[in-house]
Amino acid sequence: MTAFDGIAISSSFDSGNIAVLGREGNRFDLAIVKDHQSDFYQWFHFRLTGAKGVPLVLRIGNAGGAAYPEGWANYRACASSDRETWRRVQTRYADGALTIEITPEADAVWLAYFAPYSMERHHDLVARIAGRPGVRHERIGETLDGQDIDLLTLGEGPKTVWFYARQHPGETMAEWWMEGALERLTDPHDPVARSLRQRATFHIVPNMNPDGSRRGHLRTNAAGVNLNREWAAPTAERSPEVLCVLQRMDQTGVDFAMDVHGDEAIPHAFIAGFEGIPGWTEEQGRLYHLFRDTLARCTPDFQTRHGYGIAPKGKANLAMSTNQLAQRFGCVSTTLEMPFKENDDLPDPEHGWSPERSMRLGRACLDALHQILDEVPARG
């Protein structure tokens, strides 16, 4: 914690990340701390106290060296005084610095790159969902910091569906998505959820990277490893999180998989596929595009015009989970990306892309899966 005239900035808490370099008048000079043993950084999360009614300028001077500096264009930081409702605040990026201007309306306010999803909230989610009828919980592995890898299993159908999120811990919208999907899947009164549970068995890892989440990392685990480049040959020393999940997938098989992420730069929600894998089949591609196009009809918060480029035939990176699973199991495998900034097709000036929209997209993905699931073959 650093305090000036009663004003303090601190980040010594779950997922906190900022360094205070100094102050000149009402301007604080800040820096984002790199992921441990890595050059990645972009996630920030800190608390500002003692500044109610005081106009402040918070200047993050090393923003230009962040992992995705293009993500700062038209970006607005998130702020909350109750840690429940997060609103966007005035932010600008110029000359390699990100500048946040804020006059706090409360004695304590939290600021973050995106609305945080703490490990405490993660444990609350796991406890709540695991206690519902028909849900089984397992600890399938341990991180390098000794945290648990949680797996939730529900449904009794013959098809095998895997959802997993937060390989990149700073992409907190991914676990907000998980909360929305899990709440709906376990709703006994929801007809879509009841149908899905009858037709498929769901294996769900709400957080693949607890260590990075707690440490305030953008992209890596406790060893500075990007988990989404470990799926070809994970090891207990570098990536135990991937190792334990992939071992369980080998036991269950996979018919449909969704890896949930956030994208720093593209102001749209979209999915990426596995077109470049050596084992690509036209039927896999048909089902992937069927899901994508069905999801676009289910919600205006998803679109198909903007996204990533497609890898040439046979050139897909099999160290990435979506490619590895599609190649390994012959399944339909997808990477869902949500924006840190906004959905430019349907902007919300007050909240931007938000936890609430992430959760609703999770529910919408279940609508799309419900509509196409009968066409997905069960291989197990």
Image: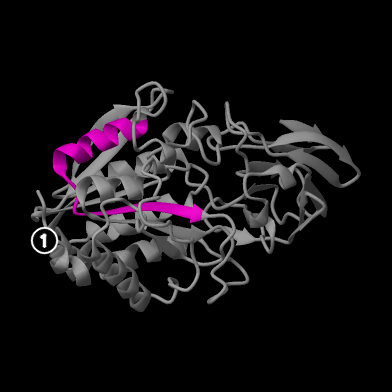
Residue depicted at 26% across the width and 31% down the height: 139
Rendered image quadrant of residue 143: top left
- Residue 30 rendering spot, x and y as whole percentages: 76, 40
| Mark 1, residue position | 199
> 239 above or below 103?
above
- Residue 346 rendering spot, x and y as whole percentages: 53, 76
Any magenta on residue 124?
no
Taking 28 as reference, is 77 left or right?
left
How is the protein colored in the picture? one colour
Along the line of sight, the residue nearer the viewer: 157 or 276:
276
- Position of the N terminus by quadrant: top right
Taking 335 as reference, is 193 left or right?
left
Along the line of sight, the residue nearer the viewer: 75 or 254:
254
- Residue 186 rendering spot, x and y as whole percentages: 22, 56
Residue depicted at 20% across the width and 64% down the height: 193
| SS at mark 1 in the image | helix
**Where does the magenta region start and end?**
241-262
What count of labels does the image hold?
A: 1
Name the kind of residue labelled 1 in the image. Answer: Arg
Along the line of sight, the residue nearer the viewer: 42 or 25:
42
